[in-house]
Image (cartoon, helix red, strand yellow):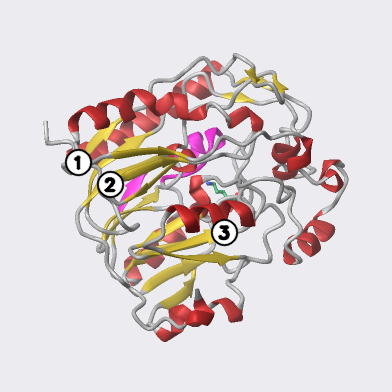
């Protein structure tokens, strides 16, 4: 087996070692404030919770195993989490919720920056203990890589003070959500630092972080103090009524090129650093589907939740024909991967992975940066 080294500075350098999640024992968690805010009013998930049906778990695992094999056949080392018992309640002195979530999307929990893997605070109570699924791997990396830095952000208390009660009604409506999210009024408050790792994109020296339902401004400030050698940028994408995670909205493919969700465009005033450094931001292709699969938290825009293997090669979900066509036009070789039946377990090809090793070092892709862009 290749040597274990943790190192990854961006989203596109050649990938050599990655974690791929599992669908084992995945639950639809009971209602709780931040989770409810993400579930659309007309969703089939409203009002139900419990372990997902075994046949859907088996199917999702078949697809995830197959994705792992595709990566391995391309010389990429793949590790898998060790599922904990997600049927157990999550309980601390401050809260109790009757079940946990799962370990399909490691991207939400683990943020790799250079030789560090940082466990995010998370912002859902049902995901408070999710890092435990990855601890056997973290221990292994710690044993084998003398430079690996295993870090964990301060665990939040997640009392009711962390959530705006206005978001607790199940009849808010999309119009009001769009207004609120455009005003940056999200379900989470500024009680304490909160972030999910999937709200962060890595561009070498620069980290781009979405302020939304799962990451608050204190969470971004915490990241800024934690990574003093980086420039940390806060972004918003008005147009998304349920803004969690940046990776179905803003997708860097290689130095100088980013796909942006055309329904959630980066506002003009936040584009300066890209313009000043000759980065192109292009609209992503339309999704191939009009609706997400059953019991799914995510939107149809998982079409752009791709995994870049190197600056010329990208994994695209097999049914996302428009996205694949666009990649081809952009000069990328497309590796088709079937994953749609696993979307309900927590996302697409980017979500279900977490970087361990990509070649390359920390570079400055935005040398022309003035203070107003930081
Ligand atoms: O568009 O529902 C999904 C992101 C999952 N990590 C969306 C965002």
* Residue 115 badge: 2
Look at the image and tell me in which quarter the N terminus lies: top left
Q: Nearer the viewer, residue 214 or 287?
A: 214
Q: Is residue 157 above or below residue 10?
A: above
Position of residue 328 measured from the top left corner of the image (x, y, whole percent): 32, 66
In the rendered structure, are the residues bearing label 2 and label 3 in contact, judged by CB atoms less than 8 Å apart? no
Q: CA distance from mark 1 to mark 2?
A: 8 Å
Helix, strand or loop for disc 1: loop
For the magenta stretch, what is the residue range? Answer: 335-349
Q: Secondary structure at mark 2?
A: loop
Of the residues tagged 2 and 3, which is closer to the observer? 2
Q: Residues within 10 Å of mark 3 (few under 14, many from 20)?
A: many
Is the C-beta of the residue carrying label 1 under 8 Å from the nearest atom of ligand 1? no
Q: CA distance from mark 2 to mark 3?
A: 23 Å
Side of 82 where 269 appears, left or right: right
The image quarter containing residue 257 is bottom left
- Disc 1 + disc 2, Cβ < 8 Å: yes
Q: Residue at x 63, y 66 (%)?
A: 263
User: Mark 1 sits on what residue?
Assistant: 5
| Neighbour tally class for label 1: few under 14, some 14-19, many 20 plus, Cα within 10 Å | some
Q: Which mark is residue 210?
A: 3
Q: Is residue 72 magenta?
A: no
92 displayed left or right of 248: right
Taking depth in this image into account, of 358 and 248 the one nearest to the observer is 358
């Amino acid at each position: 087996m290749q040597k274990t080294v943790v190192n990854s500075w961006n989203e596109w350098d050649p990938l050599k070692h990655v974690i791929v999640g599992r669908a084992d024992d995945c639950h639809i968690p009971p209602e709780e404030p931040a989770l409810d805010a993400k579930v659309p009013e007309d969703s089939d998930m409203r009002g139900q919770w419990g372990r997902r049906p075994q046949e859907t778990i088996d199917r999702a695992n078949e697809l995830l195993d197959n994705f792992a094999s595709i990566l391995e056949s391309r010389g990429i080392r793949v590790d898998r989490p060790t599922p904990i018992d997600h049927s157990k309640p999550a309980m601390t002195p401050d809260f109790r919720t009757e079940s946990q979530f799962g370990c399909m999307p490691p991207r939400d929990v683990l943020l790799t920056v250079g030789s560090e893997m940082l466990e995010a605070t998370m912002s859902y109570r049902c995901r408070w203990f999710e890092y435990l699924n990855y601890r056997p791997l973290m221990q292994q990396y710690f044993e084998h890589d003398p430079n690996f830095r295993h870090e964990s952000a301060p665990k939040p208390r997640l009392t009711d003070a962390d959530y705006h009660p206005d978001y607790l009604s199940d009849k808010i409506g999309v119009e009001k959500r769009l207004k609120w999210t455009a005003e940056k009024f999200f379900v989470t408050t500024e009680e304490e630092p909160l972030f999910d790792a999937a709200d962060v994109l890595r561009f070498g020296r620069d980290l781009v972080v979405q302020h939304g339902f799962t990451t608050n401004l204190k969470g971004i400030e915490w990241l800024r103090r934690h990574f003093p050698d980086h420039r940390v940028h806060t972004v918003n994408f008005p147009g998304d009524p349920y803004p969690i995670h940046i990776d179905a909205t803003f997708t860097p493919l290689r130095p100088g090129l980013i796909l942006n969700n055309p329904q959630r465009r980066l506002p003009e005033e936040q584009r300066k650093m890209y313009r000043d450094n000759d980065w192109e931001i292009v609209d992503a292709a339309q999704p191939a589907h009009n609706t997400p699969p059953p019991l799914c938290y995510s939107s149809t825009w998982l079409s752009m939740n791709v995994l870049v293997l190197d600056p010329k090669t990208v994994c695209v979900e097999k049914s996302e024909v428009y996205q694949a066509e666009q990649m081809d036009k952009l000069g990328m070789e497309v590796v088709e991967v079937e994953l749609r039946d696993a979307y309900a377990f927590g996302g697409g090809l980017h979500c279900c992975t977490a970087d361990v090793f990509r070649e390359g070092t920390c570079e400055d892709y935005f040398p022309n940066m003035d203070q107003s862009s930081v």
